[in-house]
């Protein structure tokens, strides 16, 4: 039976969330409660979970709220060119759409491969690539930190950890950013990324090395090369854009909020505080699709039907007044946010740690190298990407005192 949300369903589009998402979520919660009927592109119905406790319930019950997209009761109404198919697609051979014991094996395989990354090597790679990127902008005195730094750093580090040679990094950066751009270059970008992953997996099957791909292939659960390639695609996409936005959103906070002014003069602890506040107040992954209800149920006072699509409102749950009773800003190491998900389908802990090291190291290197960095435009002129899913700046123009490139004298 196909569910029909109430006629007051809220269109979930990027334009409404581009400016002040906190206000939009407050209005949704006030009018609809903790579980909001929404409409996706083409007036496709879904439920957006904004309640902290309700989201905990959804993510903690993978049987009732399944990752099996075959359950969706809307497939008959989904056209082949539906713009959200790359994100809400039919079951694919990746970790995103496996369930049950096989998912647990797959998550363990990924977690073990990432957990074995040497933390000193990871930080060293992040410093190396951050320095190289800053070398390209430091003599100029001006830069767009999003396009010229944040959107270039994470995938370079991830590529090195996976086992790619450094000279493959720029091509992977271009391919991934073309995919994110979503226009005529998207297919070419996806093809380049998949071909690169396939070639790397084949090479490591022949000659294993000390890298993530080799460890994935050596896992005793016996995943195929195709499965490994699909998971590498997921890990790259999930690790790159949110980490880039984490860098951009954190630097935006530090450059516009006087509480973090000390960070611009060497206050390293404030970098971590700003990054943690972003995960609570301005998280890169705002809303995530999805879960599918396996049988009729109740959630947050709503009647959900079998096959309904449930969207995870991560930012809405983070700002739920039921858990933020004093309206305070949560910093100081409070990690009870939903920014990395929850339950067995959450972002693996080793992946969270890798993202944090990349983002924090990148910000610290940037502030070390460009200590007088400042916004080049008024803060109210900065714009966000028009997306209900990922929240990040379209650009972050800055000025600073020009300095020579370090070249081969990197730390």
Image (spheres, grey):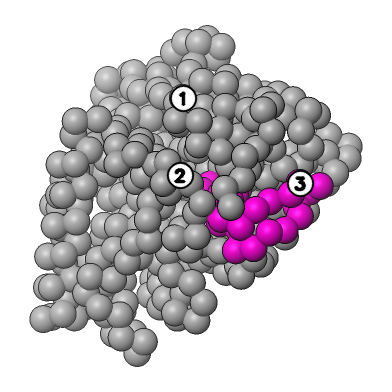
Is residue 251 visible in the rendered image? The answer is no
Picture quarter containing residue 279? Answer: top right
Circle 1 sits in a helix, a strand or a loop, which is it?
A: loop
Residue underneath mark 1: 386
Residue stretch rendered in magenta on the structure = 288-312
Marks 2 and 3 in Cβ contact (< 8 Å): no
* Crowdedness near tag 1: few (<14), some (14–19) or many (≥20) residues, C-alpha within 10 Å: some
Circle 2 sits in a helix, a strand or a loop, which is it?
A: helix
Q: Classify 245 as above or below 87.
A: above
User: Mark 1 or mark 2, which has the lower sequence index?
Assistant: 2
| Residue at position x 76%, y 46% in the image | 302
Mark 3 or 1, which is nearer the eye?
3
| Residue at position x 16%, y 80% in the image | 205
Picture quarter containing residue 342? Answer: bottom right
Is residue 99 visible in the rendered image? The answer is yes
Residue underneath mark 3: 302
The location of residue 72, given as percent across then percent down, is: 50, 54
Q: Is residue 293 magenta?
A: yes
State the residue in front, 392 or 52.
Answer: 52
Q: Which mark is residue 351?
A: none
The location of residue 303, given as percent across then percent down, is: 74, 49
Left or right relative to 282: residue 389:
left
The alpha-carbon separation of the residues under discs 1 and 2 comes to: 15 Å
Marks 1 and 2 in Cβ contact (< 8 Å): no
Q: Classify 196 as above or below 321.
A: below
User: Mark 3 or mark 1, which has the lower sequence index?
Assistant: 3
Residue underneath mark 2: 242
């Amino acid at each position: 039976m196909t569910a029909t949300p109430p006629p007051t369903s809220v269109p979930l589009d990027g334009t409404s969330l581009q400016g002040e998402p906190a206000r939009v979520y407050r209005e949704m919660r006030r009018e609809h409660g903790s579980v909001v009927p929404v409409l996706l592109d083409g007036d496709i119905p879904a439920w957006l979970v904004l309640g902290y406790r309700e989201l905990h319930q959804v993510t903690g019950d993978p049987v009732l709220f399944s990752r099996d997209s075959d359950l969706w009761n809307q497939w008959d109404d989904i056209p082949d060119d539906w713009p959200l198919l790359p994100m809400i697609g039919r079951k694919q051979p990746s970790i995103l759409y496996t369930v049950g014991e096989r998912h647990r094996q797959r998550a363990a395989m990924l977690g073990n491969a990432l957990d074995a990354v040497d933390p000193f090597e990871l930080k060293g790679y992040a410093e190396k690539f951050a320095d190289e990127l800053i070398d390209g902008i430091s003599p100029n005195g001006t830069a767009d930190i999003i396009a010229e730094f944040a959107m270039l750093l994470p995938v370079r580090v991830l590529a090195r950890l996976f086992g790619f040679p450094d000279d493959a990094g720029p091509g992977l950066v271009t391919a991934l950013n073309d995919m994110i751009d979503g226009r005529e270059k998207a297919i070419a970008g996806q093809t380049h990324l998949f071909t690169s992953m396939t070639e790397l997996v084949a090479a490591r099957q022949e000659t294993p090395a000390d890298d993530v791909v080799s460890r994935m292939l050596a896992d005793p659960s016996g995943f195929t090369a195709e499965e490994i390639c699909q998971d590498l695609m997921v890990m790259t996409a999930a690790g790159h854009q949110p980490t880039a936005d984490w860098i951009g959103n954190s630097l935006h906070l530090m450059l516009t909020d006087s509480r973090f002014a000390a960070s611009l003069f060497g206050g390293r602890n404030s970098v971590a505080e700003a990054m943690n506040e972003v995960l609570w107040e301005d998280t890169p992954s705002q809303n995530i699709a999805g879960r599918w209800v396996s049988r009729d149920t109740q959630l947050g006072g709503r009647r959900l039907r079998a096959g309904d699509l449930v969207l995870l409102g991560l930012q809405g749950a983070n700002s739920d007044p039921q858990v933020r009773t004093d309206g305070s800003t949560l910093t100081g190491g409070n990690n009870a946010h939903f920014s990395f998900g929850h339950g067995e389908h959450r972002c693996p802990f080793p992946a969270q740690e890798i993202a944090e090291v990349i983002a924090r190291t990148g910000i610290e290197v940037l502030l070390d190298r460009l200590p007088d960095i400042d916004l080049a435009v008024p803060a109210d002129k900065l714009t966000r990407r028009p997306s209900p899913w990922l929240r990040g700046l379209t650009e972050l123009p800055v000025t600073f005192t020009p300095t020579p490139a370090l070249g081969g004298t990197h730390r």
